[in-house]
Amino acid sequence: MIGDKQIGTRIVNIINAVLLAIIALVTVLPFIHIVGSSFATGAEIAEKKFLLFPTKFTLGAYKYIFSTNTILKSILVSIIVTAGGTVWSMLISTLTAYGLSRKDLPGRRFIMFYFVFTMLFNGGMIPTFIVVQQTGLLDSLLALIVPVTINVFNMIILRTFFQNLPAGLEESAKLDGANDFSILFRIVIPLSMPAIATISLFYAVTYWNTYMHAILYLSDSAKWPVQIVLRQVVVLASGMNYDSTEYTDIPPPSQSVKMAVIVVATVPVLLVYPFLQKHFAKGALVGSIKE
């Protein structure tokens, strides 16, 4: 009987492993295709519909993208917006979530309803643009940060996580004379690092991928984030049908440039994720479940 259970468990484990391997392969292959195509020549891209590893590597697409310092400047802008915006959003979201997690907060239900209401209804594009304009944020990097300071969904995850922390910790801290800010920064936040890391990654990805707000609020091209500049590169490359193997004065094939643009836009986020990965699953799950 026990032997049958062990055999059944092994079979289930093998099936799970095979299914997970297939899912992982399906997920990774498109990205490998994008990276491989960014290093391929135009002739090989035209010959092979699905390219994983090019037979001849060329840096023509990347040389074309970085032929001026425009991309580097836009990457710096995106880094500033992403870093500053993430810190600012996490600060406001954490303070808001902690306040709403306190059962003794007057009007807590009404305030929470107000936040949830904004998830369903908002002023729309034109009223938001007018607000940004009237507050003097137009054509400023702050226009990419301030209007999207709080994501209500992220704040609710943090609030739920804070509510799940043992109430005895705060009571003990108050008996020792700690105030609310001391409890938050010395006890609650250190114990909530999985949720903090997860929400920080959510905010960072959102700020890094900023596109529409930059189109609406920024007219100075020197302040454009990397997503806008990369779009310009793609638009310019779309009219190219050159078939060069090396980049000299002739632009590389448009398909190769498009793939290289995707790599440039994606790699920075992929470099950050491993540092937060160990907290990611725990923070996303525990913070979304009320115990």
Image (tube, rainbow, N blue to C red):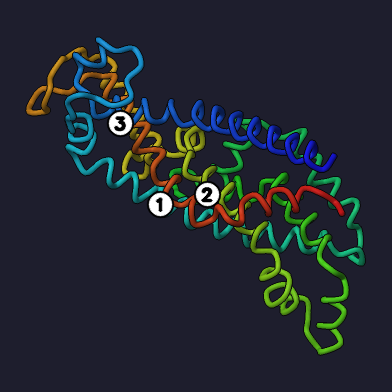
* Among the 4 quarters of the image, the one containing residue 162: bottom right
**Residue found farthest to the top:** 47
Gap between marks 1 and 3 measured at Cα = 19 Å
Residue 278 x %, y %: 58, 56
Q: Residues within 10 Å of mark 3 (few under 14, many from 20)?
A: many
Q: Amino acid at mark 3?
A: Ala
Residue visible at 65% across and 30% down in the picture: 15
Residue visible at 21% across and 19% down in the picture: 253
Q: Residues within 10 Å of mark 2 (few under 14, many from 20)?
A: many
Gap between marks 2 and 3 measured at Cα = 22 Å
Q: Kindly identify which residue carries mark 2.
A: 204
Marks 1/2 in contact by CB < 8 Å: the verdict is no
- Viewer-side label of 2, 3: 3
Horizontal relation, residue 6 to residue 278: left or right: right
Q: Earlier in the sequence, mark 1 or mark 3?
A: 1
Q: Quadrant of the N terminus?
A: top right
Residue 18 x %, y %: 58, 30
Q: Amino acid at mark 2?
A: Ala
Q: Residues within 10 Å of mark 1 (few under 14, many from 20)?
A: some
Q: Earlier in the sequence, mark 2 or mark 3?
A: 2
Q: Quadrant of the C terminus?
A: bottom right
Q: Kindly identify which residue carries mark 3.
A: 260
**Nearer to us in this view, 286 or 54:** 54
Residue 160, relative to residue 254: is it above or below?
A: below
Q: Amino acid at mark 1?
A: Ile
Residue visible at 56% across and 43% down in the picture: 132
Q: Residue 79 got which mark?
A: 1
**Nearer to us in this view, 166 or 10:** 10
**Nearer to us in this view, 96 or 146:** 96
